Structures are given as structure tokens and as C-alpha cells.
Image (cartoon, rainbow, N blue to C red):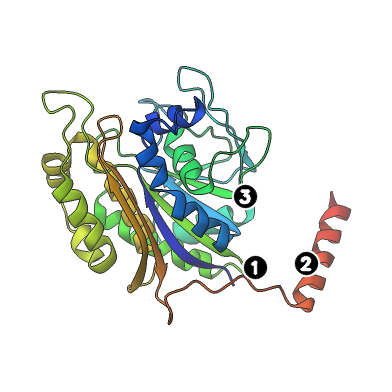
Amino acid sequence: MAKIIAGIGSSHVPAIGAALDNGKTEEPYWKRVFSGFEKSQQWMRDTKPDVAIVVYNDHASAFSVEIIPTFALGCAAEFPPADEGWGPRPVPVVKGHPALASHIAQSVILDEFDLTICNKMEVDHGMTVPMNLLFGKIDKDSHWPCPVIPLAVNVVMYPPPTGHRCYMLGKAIRKAVESYPDDLRVVIFGTGGLSHQISGPRAGLINSKWDKTFLDNLSKNPQKLAKIPHVDYMREAGAEGIEMVMWLIMRGALDDKVDEVYRFYTVPASNTAVGHIILENHRRGGKTPARRKPAAGKLKHAAARAKIQRVRG
């Protein structure tokens, strides 16, 4: 049985990607940002997930005002980096997990969550920046450490989904993953935010008190966050602060009780508050179990299945 073992929340500031791509990570302005993710990268190396589900929002790369899906699930075998106006980021093509993604789509849709299924999609900084922050810088000719399933959420054009809808979608995703027969260890990312506004009279707005309270309740009282109306996000966290509802998909996919493994917060990074948190499903000792070697029977079964797939191919 597959299982979601942990959730990751992370901002996806595009300038972070530019700093990484252009060798500016050691500059004083950026060093404090990147140093805040060093422990997280070690955690990821130790955890070694089999699959990552990354919840993010598209920035007019895969979609436009002509087509605006509320929730779009990537079921393709791969997702190339998008050209956001200055060429694609020099990162590897994202390899998907079509079997698990299709299973999630079927389960979630039958649970009455309408998804747009994407069998071809480019992914932008909203997805690749958090992946770099957790997996580290990876040469574009190499590969990401595990397959990734993208879940794009509309938080750009009105109306975006409510926090409660996102929280309940997370629960439906958890149910879907746990009904998948293969023994997979899955992590789920919630990305975007935290407080920021990039245009208008309040451009540059950052509300650290709101952000830190949000992070507190993400661990301890997510049901309270699920009740926050859109207008409160706009008023307190800026126009782009609505991205924070995507963190609730991640939180809904976890146990009611979680262990906060790590938290990092700093301001500003390109006029944005950078927030980050790692939550593990609650266990005695507070640690994710070490990866166990698969049993001989499972290895034999997997080998036989791979042989059948090769013959069919």
C-alpha cells in the first residue's frame, strides 16, 4: 500500500530560481534564504521518497485566460520546464508517475472532486523552485531524485477554490494514495505564498504576524485555517497571499496530528515572505521510519511484472 509520509510547505519565489541559476546563492542577500533550506535538503536525502506530489499554481505557462482549470492533475510521463519569457530554467525534465497519477484522478473524481487531467503540460517556477529548494541544484542533463506528480491550482483568476475545498481535496488525495497497491512512500508539497503583493498601492506588503500564525495553525489547527475566507487572505496577506490555500491541500493529506520537523521563515526575498515547513505524520519517537529493503517476494513479483511489461512493449 502506498502512503503519504510527510508534507512540505514552501514559497516558490521566481527570483529564488534566478539566484540559483545565476550563481548568486552565496551573495549576502540570498545566502540567508538558501541556508534556511540546508537542513531540509538533508531531511530529503535521508527520507528518500519514492514519489512527490507537488501542489503549485501555474503562472500563464501551461494555461491562460482562455482555459482556467481549478484543479489540474499531471498524468503524463514527463513535464518539461516552461519558457516564462527568458527561456526554460536549466533544470531537468520532470519525470511523472502516470500510474499513480491516473489512480489518484480516478479516485478523486469518483469522490466528486472535478479535476482537469493533463497528459501534456509544461511546468514553471511555481513547481521547480520548491523542488530545487528541497532537492538541491541539479544539472539539467541529470534527473530529479524521484518521480513527481504535478497538481496545478487556480489562485490567479477569480474565483479560486476555498481553503476548505483545498483541505478536503487533500483528504481525498490521501485516500487515493492509500488505495494504490504498490508500496510507495510519498511526500506532498504545498507551495506558494506566504504574504506578498506584487502590484497596486500595497505592492511589497508583507505581514509576518499573519504568516507565523498561519504556520502555527498549519501544525496544530488546520481546521481553523480551512475556514478563512478569501477576503481575509487578500486583506491580511496581500493579493497573492491567496496562494496559501494550496498549503491546505498538503495539510489535508496528512494525519490530524503531525510532528513539525522543521520551520524556516525570512523576509524579504524579492518583496515576498519566504515560508517553509516540514510536517511528518505523528509517530512515536517523531521520526520517519528508515527505508526498509523490500522483501524477497516483493522483489520477485516486481521483476516478473517488469518482464511482462517488456514483453507487452
x, y percent for residue 246: 33, 49
**Left or right: 126 as drawn, with respect to 234:** right
Neighbor class of circle 3 (other Cα within 10 Å; few <14, some 14-19, many 20+) is some
Residue 154 marker? none
Q: Secondary structure at mark 1?
A: loop
Are the residues at dot 1 and dot 3 in contact (C-beta closer than 8 Å)? Answer: no
Name the image quarter holding residue 182.
bottom right
Q: Which residue is mark 3?
A: 145
User: How far is disc 1 from disc 3 in space, using C-alphas?
Assistant: 19 Å
Residue, x 57% and y 68% (percent of image)?
2
Residue on which the image places disc 1: 182
Q: Position of residue 67 (x, y in %)?
A: 40, 30
The residue lying at 22 percent from left, 62 percent from top is: 217
Q: Which residue is mark 2?
A: 302
SS of the residue at dot 2?
A: helix
Residue at image position (41%, 45%) is: 35
Left or right of residue 146, residue 260 in this image: left
